[in-house]
Image (cartoon, grey):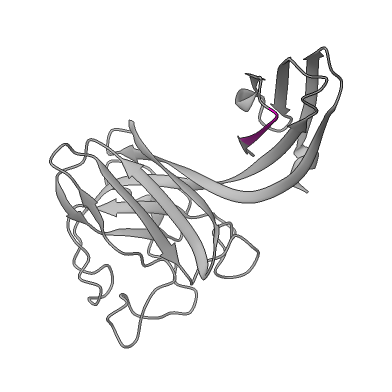
Amino acid sequence: MLIRNCVLAATLVWTTVVFAQSVTQSAHADIVNAHGQKIGIATIHRADGGIRIDIQVSQLPPGTHGIHVHSVGKCEGPAFTSAGAHLNPTSKKHGKDNPEGPHAGDLLNIEVQVSGVGKASLLDSNITLDDGPNSLFHEGGTAIVIHEKADDYKTDPAGNSGARIACGVIEKSFAISLSIDPRRAATHSLALIAADHPRNSFAVSVAEQSFLLHLPV
C-alpha cells in the first residue's frame, strides 16, 4: 500500500490526538515547455464516468490546442517524441469523431487565452488509475502532451494537431485526511517524509480541525 512508503511524524502542542482517516489514490503531472521550464500542472483523480484531468498552464500560444495522454512517461524536449504515441492499448484510430476511434488517451482540446493561460477539466472514460492495459501507470509510464494546434478529433494519428509543445510525466500521488480533536488542539506541526523520495519531504503547520494533504509518491 502507498501508505507504507511514507513515514509520519507529528509534534503537537497541547494535544496528542491525530489519526489518518483515509488514503485516496490520485496522480499529477508537472507540465514543462520545450526548454524544460515548468509552465503548469495537471491533477488527475477518479470521477463519475472515468478519470478527471484538471489542467492549468501558462506561457503557451493563444488559441486551441490538442492535448492527449501518451504511452511513455518521458518528456525530453524540445520535440517530446520520447513520450511515444497516444495511449492506445486497443489499437483504435484517433478521435472521438472517428468511427474507428478513439484512442484511450484522446482528450478534448484546451483553450489558451491571449494571456497565455489555459485551464480545462477533462474527462476520460477510457483510462484508469488501477492496473491493466489502460492504466496510467503501466510499465514505462504515461505522459500528458499539449500540441501546437487544435485536434480535429478524427484524423489519425493525432488529429492534425501539429508539433508537441509541452509535456508532463504522470506520477502517482495520494492524499491523507487527518482530523484533530479541537478540544485539545491549538497549534499543530506535522512533518511527513516520503521514505522512498526524501526530496519530497516537507512540513506544514495547521490550526484547523481537519485538513487534507496531497503527497507525491
Describe residue 54's horizontal placement relative to residue 37 as left or right: right
- Residue at x 65%, y 51% (from the top left corner): 25
**On the rendered image, what quadrant is the C terminus found in?**
top right
Q: Is residue 4 rendered magenta in the image?
A: no
> 72 or 174, which lies in front?
174
Name which quarter of the figure residue 65 lies in.
bottom left
Up/down of 13 relative to 140, above or below? above
Describe residue 210's horizontal placement relative to residue 98 as left or right: right
- Residue at x 76%, y 38% (from the top left corner): 5
Name which quarter of the figure residue 134 lies in.
bottom right
- Residue at x 34%, y 86% (from the top left corner): 100
Name which quarter of the figure residue 110 lies in.
bottom left
Up/down of 190 relative to 74, above or below? above
* Name of the residue lying farthest toward the top: 13
Q: Position of residue 43 (x, y in %)?
A: 48, 46
Up/down of 72 relative to 22, above or below? below
Up/down of 45 relative to 35, above or below? below
- Residue at x 31%, y 41% (from the top left corner): 57
Most common secondary structure along the magenta stretch: strand
> 213 or 216, which lies in front?
213
Q: Position of residue 54 (x, y in %)?
A: 42, 50
Q: Position of residue 193 (x, y in %)?
A: 71, 26
Q: Which residues are magenta?
A: 209-213
